[in-house]
Each structure stands twice: as C-alpha cells, then as structure tokens.
Image: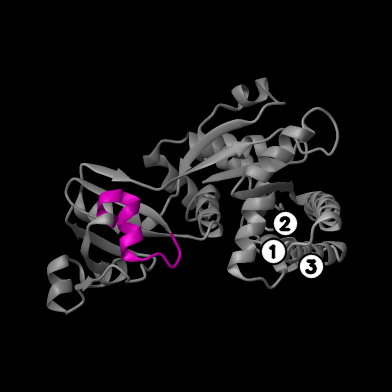
Amino acid sequence: MRIVILGLPQAGQQELFSVISGVPLDTIRQKPMEAQVGSCNVRDPRITKLSQMYKPKKTTYTRIEYLLLPDFTTQGPSKSLILTELRNADELCWVAQAGSAEADINTFLAELIINDLMLVEKRLENINRELKSRQSDERLKEKALMELCQKQLNLEQPVSALEMSDEQKKQLRTTYQFLTIKPIVLVVNVPEDKIKDASIALAIREKYHHPCVQLSAGLEAEIGQLAESERGEFMKELGIDEPAVDKLSRLVYEGLGLISFFTVGEDEVRAWPVRRSASAAEAGGVIHTDIAKGFVRAEHFTYDDLIALGSEDKIKEAGKFSLKGRDYIVQDGDILSFRFNV
C-alpha cells in the first residue's frame, strides 16, 4: 500500500509528511527534488481499546507507506518523476492551503485528466494502426473501452465516475494506470484558529466528492513532538479529540478499499488489513499462506459485542460466539482465531 503525498509549493505537504513519517523536516528539505519514503500506523482506536483489555506483550497496528513527491509542477526536471510515481501509487493525497484550496485542487484534478486523455489518445492511435493490418475482437473491445474513457475525459470528468464492470476497472488500473481512477484524499491546511471550523472540509467534500480532512500542519507537528502523556491535555485545551493525522490515516485506509479484522491474546493484539468482501480463508492467508491452504474454520466474535459485553466469557454466554467456514465474508471489526491443518 503506497500513498503519494503532494501539493503546490508551500502548501504544507512537507510538514504533513514529517508528522506522519517521523522524518525530520530539515532532512526532507535537504532533498527537495527527490521522492522520500516514510510510513505510519493506522491509528485505529479499537486496537488501543483491545490492548487495554488484553494487556498483551505486543500491540501491532496496520501500517501504510507514504511517498512524498517534489512540489507539484507540470514543467521542469521533476515532472517525469512525479508522473511516474503517481501512476505507481495506490492512492493520491493532495495538500492545499486553505486560502487557495479550490484553485489548487482544480489545478491538480485538471492535470490528472489531461494526462489520462493523452494516454487514451496515444493508445487509440496504436489500436487503430493494429486494426488496419489485422482485425481483432480483443482490440475492438479495447477500442470501445478507450473511446468510452476518451468521451468521459473530454467532459472533464474522471474515469472513476464511469459505470464499468469490475473487470474493466481492473484493466484500467493495472494495464493503463489511469490517474483519474485512483482514490484521492484531499487535505486542507488551515490556520490554527480554523481547526474546529468543519465547514471548510465539508464544502470541499461536497464540491469534489472526495474525502477531505482539514488540519493545521504546524499544530500537528507540535502535537507530534509532545510526550504521549501530555498530548491528551494539550488537545483538550484546543477542543480536539485526536490528532487530525490519525483521522487522515483512517480515511486513506478506507480509500484503499480495506477493512480490519483483529487477532487478540496475551501475546499480541493486532489489526490485519484485508480487502472489503474478502472471505475468511483469504483473511487467514493475510496472516500466513498455510492458513488459507489448510483452512478448517474460524472462531468468531465482534469488537462491538466484546465492548458491549465486557469479556469473551460473556460473549459465549450471550450466544454471540460462532464458528465460520472458509467462505464467510469478513466484516470490519471481526475478531478471528483460525484453525487450520497442513
């Protein structure tokens, strides 16, 4: 899972990446023309709660990798790097200053459409050339799909808004790496006195139909530098319940089409990422391929039932504990223990 972070100069993307990854800001600024890699936990409060209940030797959150790109530009030496990394990314995170947020977002989205349109036109040229020498049902299908995308892009609309089969969507993502089919999260960098003004992010979400988080990059950096024991009181004084970067990590995670199931015990409490609609056998395979191969059953209860009832014994007494077969569709918040035989 790789998420690209980028924005126009001075938008706050470097400060945000520093907070997320722990890479010092001075280190980032020493190499402004290079892509920089970092990662962070998906701060799921459910894992924190489970850890408090089970008191394990180890607590493991899901981690996401981020890639900070040079300042966004359609010209100059970094253009090729930026476009390559955008095409290789699983998700795009665009950072904009509050004062120019809509104009900056328009610039970014327009550039994605232009690049996808160029890709379509080039591919259509090649397809038409091939069809002149040899007719092919496969190429005719591809041509129809490309023309559908071309029409959409000429309307200045993203490919992601098209109604397509799952097979067509997969083809566009993997074969052509369209930019406008990738999930996008928008971040608005606001002044510190605007962090509680939810209308800013709401207006952006309603206009662009992408998830949006508003934060103050400077304030997030200040929170990140505090000891864990001091953060709660500091945030309470500001009237916020958690760092905005924690909310951002969860939005990014959801945008990737992922949910979490949990394993719990005295040794470890852990969140495991799995694609939405994955089966129990597939979820077991995330832990180890042997579980998927030799899957027998999964012992199952839910996080919500555990919190409501207070213990595993109470869950069993209430009839909320169950056994699931390999085809069971895993739900977000499931707590699973796998039985397998290889």
Q: Nearer the viewer, mark 3 or mark 2?
A: 3
186 versus 81 height, above or below? below
Is residue 212 visible to the viewer in this orientation of the structure?
no
Q: Nearer the viewer, mark 3 or mark 1?
A: 3
Q: Residue at x 63, y 58 (%)?
A: 171
- Asked whether the beta carbons under mark 1 and mark 2 sit within 8 Å of each other, the answer is yes
Disc 1 residue type (three-letter): Ser
The image shows residue 239 at horizontal and vertical percentages of 52, 55
Disc 1 and disc 2: Cα gap in Å? Answer: 6 Å
Looking at the rendered structure, the secondary structure element under dot 2 is: loop
Disc 3 and disc 2: Cα gap in Å? Answer: 14 Å
The residue tagged 1 is 160
Disc 3 residue type (three-letter): Leu
Q: Residue at x 65, y 34 (%)?
A: 14
The residue tagged 2 is 180
Which span is picked out in magenta?
275-292
324 versus 267 height, above or below? below
Q: Which residue is nearer to you in this view: 149 or 305? A: 149
The residue tagged 3 is 148
The image shows residue 3 at horizontal and vertical percentages of 58, 45
Is residue 128 visible to the viewer in this orientation of the structure?
yes
